[in-house]
Image (tube, helix red, strand yellow):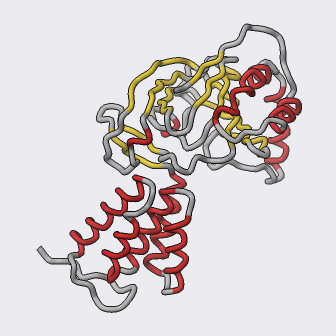
Amino acid sequence: MVRTFEYDSDDKAISLDDFYEICESTPIKSGEDLEPLCPYLHRLSNNRAFLAEYLCDYLKSFATLEAPHSLLPTTFIPRFGKDYVFRIVVWPDNFNTIEKGQYNYLHNHDINFITCGYAGPGYKTDIYEFDFESCSGVLGEKADFRFVESTFLTQGKVMQFTAGTDIHLQYPPEATSVSINVVQRERQMAVAECSFDSKTYRVNGHAVSIFAKDMMLHAIANFGDENCRDVLMQIATRHPFMRVRAAAWHALMQSHPEDIDQLAEQGAKDPHLYVRTSVKQFHEGMTQYFGLSVLPGHGQAMNRVTP
């Protein structure tokens, strides 16, 4: 579950460079390894100058088109460390919010991280605990999670989130706020990163990056040649991320309908529940939608059964 660390109010502060040095000297191989960094992240939050200095330098590089950009809105990534990523996240208030999806979005993460309020009143967040191992992550699936608390990420407060288990929903702060995060660089490939409907307790979405991978493999299924089959099979059986494996099985079944039953049987042996469930649903959907009649030859479309 989410752990909260609140420290005595003091004037101790460290520089950003000193903080990086501490992070680099701390092996971060699991979520637990982030805990020793919590007091130092708090001390960095006491440094009231580093953010303005960083933003000024960023603005100079931005003007010359040399600044590294995040795919996420209002997120800055000053440092990619050996085992960690340091992020600065701006949380706009209601008046300034452009990206509405940033809030009112109940979700878990496939990363372990610690976060600390740096500026502003901080966003409000509803925190839930999730038995992610019992949920495959397939859309529409019932998810077993329970409400834990509502709290604010105020200045100097540090919170530690565990991949998969901890899910939360954030609300716009009363005034624009900033948080600083340390993220374990290695993603937890066995965790299904999902969004949830808090009323029905069902999975209702997936990470955008997964959708992009699905679309890429979908294109291969439609326009690739026979040489792509071996590569797709390697991805389906060896890729470390279960959602990518599932998408590869989908692409294989779509591009080789003559082997759909055999491919579905192979995919059903995957060690992860998400892949097994997803392959089964895709196989059932393909056979019900298109019927069992297949035009001869690889890569040709199947005949749809006329009702």
- Please determine whether, in this image, residue 21 is positioned above or below residue 44: below
Q: Is residue 292 visible?
A: yes
Query: Residue 179 location in percent, x, y?
Result: 67, 28
Q: Is 288 left, or right, of 24 in this rendering?
A: left
Q: Is 90 left, or right, of 195 in this rendering?
A: right
Query: Residue 19 location in percent, x, y?
Result: 83, 30
Considering depth in this image, is 129 or 172 the residue closer to the camera? Answer: 129
At 81% from the left and 41% from the top, the residue drawn is 58
At 40% from the left and 52% from the top, the residue drawn is 273
Residue farthest toward the left in the current orientation of the protein: 307
Residue farthest toward the top in the current orientation of the protein: 9
**Residue 73 appears in which quarter of the rendering?**
top right
At 39% from the left and 48% from the top, the residue drawn is 136
- Please determine whether, in this image, residue 28 is positioned above or below residue 225: above
Query: Residue 87 location in percent, x, y?
Result: 71, 37
Q: Is 124 left, or right, of 197 in this rendering?
A: right
- Please determine whether, in this image, residue 236 is positioned above or below residue 181: below
Considering depth in this image, is 111 or 60 the residue closer to the camera? Answer: 111
Query: Residue 62 location in percent, x, y?
Result: 79, 47
Q: Is residue 100 visible?
A: no
At 31% from the left and 62% from the top, the residue drawn is 280
**Residue 45 appears in which quarter of the rendering?**
top right
**Residue 143 appears in which quarter of the rendering?**
top left
Considering depth in this image, is 77 or 62 the residue closer to the camera? Answer: 77
